[in-house]
Amino acid sequence: MINVLMFGPPGSGKGTQSVTLAEKYNLLHLSTGDMLRAELKAGTGLGKKMEAIMAAGELVPDEVVIEMIAQKIDSTTGKKGFVFDGFPRTVEQAEALQKMLEVRGMKIDLMLVLEVNDVELMDRMKKRALVSGRADDADEAVINNRIEVYRSKTEPVIEYGRSTGVSRQVDGVGSIEDIFDRLCSHIETII
Ligand code: AMP
């Protein structure tokens, strides 16, 4: 089993790249953002509780996403591993993931960190806002807050990955195909 974490600020291309990486290597793509948006769309109790937090660009409580991920891991068969997209977003989530994998005989094998400068990020997010229909993409203040939350709460997870030797910086600027090739070259080293 191989477990890859896709990292990077909002708008860095994690989602797009995770989908194609998962296809190529027969991994399950697990996006906590997609799972939470599915809860909102279905109008579940959990979705209703999380809506305001997500619309403000803040993080939902750690235990909510940790539980979602644990359930998915346990109900998955026939895959060679997982691509985690948008999870973990705090050091607490990273520690919980590591434990969750350990007790199931797995580990975090690779953490791919997409690097994109803030000017390019804003530009991409504004373009995405025109097509995504996401409330948290539509407002510049919310986008800025999401980038800020990434820097303050999520970037420390990269340090955690560095200390365990699994993190790799990847230039996230260029064509989607070129960035994909860069990511694949790192995955090839662990399979
Ligand atoms: P994303 O699609 O990954 O940009 O996530 C959209 C929103 O969902 C985030 O701004 C958070 O409000 C929430 N979210 C997604 N993943 C997580 C996570 N791992 N921890 C906390 N909140 C999350």
Image (cartoon, rainbow, N blue to C red):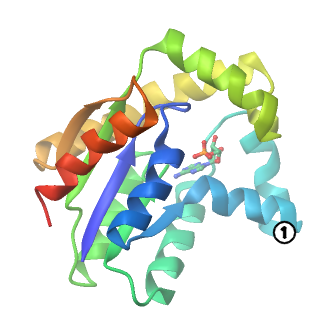
Instruction: State the residue at coordinates (62%, 53%).
Output: 33
The quarter of the picture where the C terminus appears is bottom left
The quarter of the picture where the N terminus appears is bottom left
Q: x, y percentage for residue 65? A: 56, 62
- Quarter-of-image position of residue 129: top right
Q: Of helix, strand and loop, which one carries label 1?
A: helix
Q: Given the current orientation, which residue lies at the most extreme right position?
A: 43
Tag count:
1
According to the picture, the residue beneath numbered tag 1 turns out to be 45
The residue lying toward the viewer, choosing from 119 and 42, is 119
Q: x, y percentage for residue 90? A: 42, 45
Q: Is residue 46 left or right of residue 183?
A: right
Does mark 1's beta carbon lie closer than 8 Å to ligand 1?
A: no
Q: x, y percentage for residue 8? A: 42, 35
Disc 1 packing (10 Å; few <14; some 14–19; many ≥20): few
The amino acid beneath tag 1 is Gly
In this view, 127 is above or below 41: above
- Quarter-of-image position of residue 183: top left
The residue lying toward the viewer, choosing from 81 and 65, is 81
Q: Is residue 95 left or right of residue 105?
A: right
- Quarter-of-image position of residue 37: bottom right
Q: x, y percentage for residue 145? A: 63, 23
Instruction: State the residue at coordinates (37%, 73%).
Output: 26
Instruction: State the residue at coordinates (57%, 58%).
Output: 32
Q: Given the current orientation, which residue lies at the most extreme top position?
A: 119
Q: Is residue 132 left or right of residue 145?
A: right
In this view, 45 is above or below 111: below
Instruction: State the residue at coordinates (45%, 47%).
Output: 17
